[in-house]
Image (cartoon, rainbow, N blue to C red):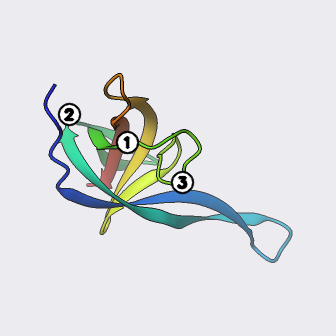
Amino acid sequence: MSAPRLNRRLTLETPQRVSDGAGGFEEVWVPLGVLWAELTARAGRESQNAGVPVSMVPYTIVVRGAPHGHPERPVARQRLRDGARVFHIRSVAERDPEARYLVCAADEEVAV
């Protein structure tokens, strides 16, 4: 297995609940750090979300490995950001037996 080409700088973000001042909360995204990644697009599709056409493209994103619980190890429900582009992480797994790299299954959704 060849080493991935980690040529994209992505910001790892996690959701955090903050008080909205009226007894409820809102969700904000907090940056955890920067990861270098290799992105590979898969076959996309178009769907409807609340009556709005949405283009959804699944991606395989490879990043350097990190131990479980480490802040630089992505987990499901976090996201990776590249400027205005957002990749929602669905799952994370080790790419190789030594866990040198992680593979994130992620989706990018864009209203069309």
What residue is drawn where x is 53% and y is 44%?
77
Residue 14, position as x, y percentages in the image? 55, 57
Q: In the figure, is residue 76 to the left or right of 96?
A: right
Alpha-carbon span between mark 2 and mark 3: 27 Å
- How crowded is the residue under tag 3: few (<14 C-alpha within 10 Å), some, or many (20+)? few
Q: Amino acid at mark 1?
A: Gln
Expressed as whole percent of the image width and height from the top left, the position of residue 103 reads 34, 35
Residue 93 falls in image quadrant: top left
Q: Amino acid at mark 2?
A: Arg
Residues 93 and 41: in front is 93
Question: Horizontally, is 103 left or right of 26 in the view?
Answer: left
Q: Earlier in the sequence, mark 3 or mark 1?
A: 1
Q: Which mark is residue 42?
A: 2
Residue 71: x and y in percent read: 54, 54
Q: Are marks 3 and 1 in contact (CB under 8 Å)?
A: no
Considering every residue shown, the one lying at the far front of the view is: 98
Q: Give the structural element (helix, strand or loop) at label 3.
A: loop
- Residue that extends furthest to the right in the rendered view of this protein: 23
Q: Secondary structure at mark 1?
A: strand
Query: Can you identify the residue that label 1 sits on?
Result: 48
Residue that mark 3 sits on: 71
Tell whether label 1 touches label 2 (CB within 8 Å). no
Residue 67 placed where, x, y %? 50, 40
- Label 1 environment density (alpha carbons within 10 Å; few <14, some 14–19, many ≥20): few
At horizontal 26% and vertical 55% (from top left) the residue drawn is: 112
Vertical side of 56 occupied by 86: above or below: below
- Nearer the observer: mark 2 or 3; the answer is 3
Label 2 or label 1, whichever comes before in sequence order? 2
* Res. 17 in view: yes
Q: How many marks?
A: 3
Q: Which is more foreground, mark 2 or mark 1?
A: 2
